[in-house]
Image (tube, grey):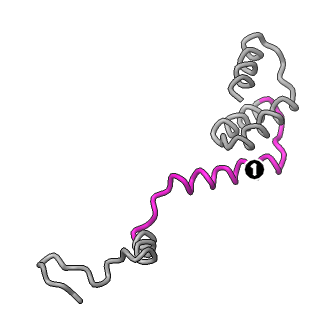
């Protein structure tokens, strides 16, 4: 994928026209390689050249964005507490700050 982006930059530098199929292939490759950010950058470039991405490409990139978001998202305190309880690490019956036990 890095090589493809290198060639795309060479084409731009040498004023070689970039047709719609190049954008489609590159966006598909980004979606398959889970490279959401570069794929969306290509969508913007594609639109600047007057081309439109397909619905399937946009859906693939949206799915990759959701996966990336899920990987980097910090769970809310209630979700984290529920996960600890599911693993038997919950705070029920834990000692309080004054040293007394609620058990």
Q: Is residue 46 magenta?
A: no
Q: Is residue 76 magenta?
A: yes
Image coords of residue 34 (percent x, y): 67, 44
Q: Quadrant of residue 80?
A: bottom left
Image coords of residue 65 (percent x, y): 64, 50
Left or right: residue 33 versus residue 79 is: right
Q: Which residues are magenta?
A: 49-77
Residue 68 to residue 49: above or below = below
Image coords of residue 76 (percent x, y): 43, 66
Left or right: residue 37 versus residue 83 is: right
Q: Quadrant of residue 22?
A: top right
For this orientation, the residue located farthest to the left is: 98
Q: Quadrant of the C terminus?
A: bottom left
Residue at 36% of width from left, 74% of height from top?
A: 89
Residue at 68% of width from left, 40% of height from top?
A: 40
Examine the residues drawn in magenta and state their main secondary structure: helix
Residue at 79% of width from left, 46% of height from top?
A: 57
Query: Which residue corresponds to mark 1?
Result: 60
């Amino acid at each position: 994928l890095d090589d493809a982006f290198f060639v795309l930059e060479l084409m731009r530098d040498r004023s070689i026209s970039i047709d719609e199929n190049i954008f489609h292939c590159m966006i598909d490759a980004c979606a398959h390689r889970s490279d959401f950010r570069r794929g969306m950058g290509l969508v913007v470039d594609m639109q600047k050249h007057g081309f439109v991405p397909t619905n399937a490409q946009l859906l693939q990139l949206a799915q990759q964005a959701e996966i990336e978001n899920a990987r980097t998202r910090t769970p809310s305190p209630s979700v984290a507490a529920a996960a600890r309880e599911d693993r038997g690490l919950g705070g029920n019956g834990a000692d309080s700050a004054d040293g007394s036990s609620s058990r």
